[in-house]
Image (cartoon, rainbow, N blue to C red):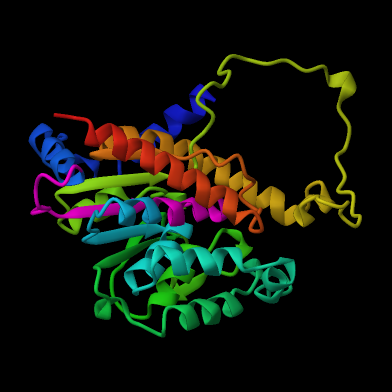
Amino acid sequence: MRYFISYILGILLCIPVISQQPNSTALEIKFSQVLRGEAEQDFTIGLALGAGAAKGFAHVGVLKALEEAGVRIDMIAGSSMGAIIGGGYASGLSPAELEEISLNSDWLDVLNLIDPIFPTRGFIDGQKIKEFLDEIYGGKNIEDLNIPFSATTVDILKSELYVINSGNLANAARASGSIPIVFNPLSEGDKVLVDGGMIDPVPIDVVRSMGADYIIAVNVLALPEKRDDSFQYLSGNNLKISRSRWRIPNEGEAWYTAGQPNLAEIAHETVILSMALIAETQVELAKPDMTINVNTGLSAWNFLDAEIAIDKGYEDMKKSLNITRAKK
């Protein structure tokens, strides 16, 4: 794992983090005064909402805690699920409305959003998801939003990051969430656009470039705080071919575990693990003013337990705000 992280670090050094600014102690104190009701918020706050598929429902809880604290969000940059949730908030949906949309879905609703295709560039076409997003966003364009918004996407052919800051909001969110292999990517000209989290899982520098004075970064791909980086050993005598086992889920068991796991889930979790390792190093390098590392404990494929992720995001954001509020 150490070698992989070193490799990722080399990639990240090519991302324009050189534009970063050191944390401002004065601004942090000012923010604490705002939270205590002792000062007006006369500086801009930007949110960098990270990738994470179903883990990204935690962003709804984060927004809920910020709204309760009276924090004004002036700009948002989102990657993948962060773009989907952040785009919804920027379009005018309240945290309560986003929570209702997230929670009022069962497995049939999820299946109705899946339009499988014979694998060309992905297992799922994604047109139904785009139409769903267009409906909840009210068909808005990014330039018409009350809160400035940007989404990230990556040209997989040239390994180049693109920022989408104009045009149809649903298309932008759909492009940003195009998990490779799982979803059919969007394209522009010869560009093949996949999940922005492949290079920029927590778009801190994007929201910094938008002019944010104070940046709150939300990383929903946080790895367990205590994990063993030392070598672990297995015996080759005990290894055998792994097979998916399809069956009807038992009572109280999540539907997605019935495959133990299937091809799409393995592809998805592989991408998510890579993003998590990049995000960990990226946050360290880009130095946002506040970082919320959320470990939901959920599989990235588990879209039916949104409440767990929302509650965890809310809880972690509240803790960070309470710490900042106490600073003098």
50 in the magenta segment:
yes
User: Residue at position x 15%, y 55% from top?
Assistant: 44
Q: How many marks?
A: 0
Question: What span is colored magenta in the figure?
Answer: 36-62
Q: Is residue 270 left or right of residue 152?
A: right
Q: Is residue 227 above or below residue 123?
A: above
Q: Is residue 221 above or below residue 174?
A: above
Q: Is residue 199 left or right of residue 118?
A: left
Give the quarter of the figure containing the C terminus: top left
User: Residue at position x 51%, y 55% from top?
Assistant: 57
Residue 220 seen in the current view: no
Q: Nearer the viewer, residue 124 or 129?
A: 129
User: Residue at position x 78%, y 56% from top?
Assistant: 255
Q: Nearer the viewer, residue 186 or 110?
A: 110
Q: Is residue 88 above or below residue 138?
A: above
Q: Nearer the viewer, residue 212 or 279?
A: 212
Q: Is residue 245 above or below residue 26?
A: below
Where is residue 298? Give x, y as percent. 62, 44
**Residue 171 occupies quadrant:** bottom left
Where is residue 221? Give x, y as percent. 50, 42
Where is residue 278? Give x, y as percent. 44, 39
Give the quarter of the figure containing the N terminus: top right
Q: Is residue 179 left or right of residue 280?
A: right
User: Residue at position x 89%, y 19% from top?
Assistant: 237
Residue 170 seen in the current view: yes
**What is the residue that sits farthest to the front in this orientation?**
37
Where is residue 279? Give x, y as percent. 42, 40
235 in the magenta segment:
no
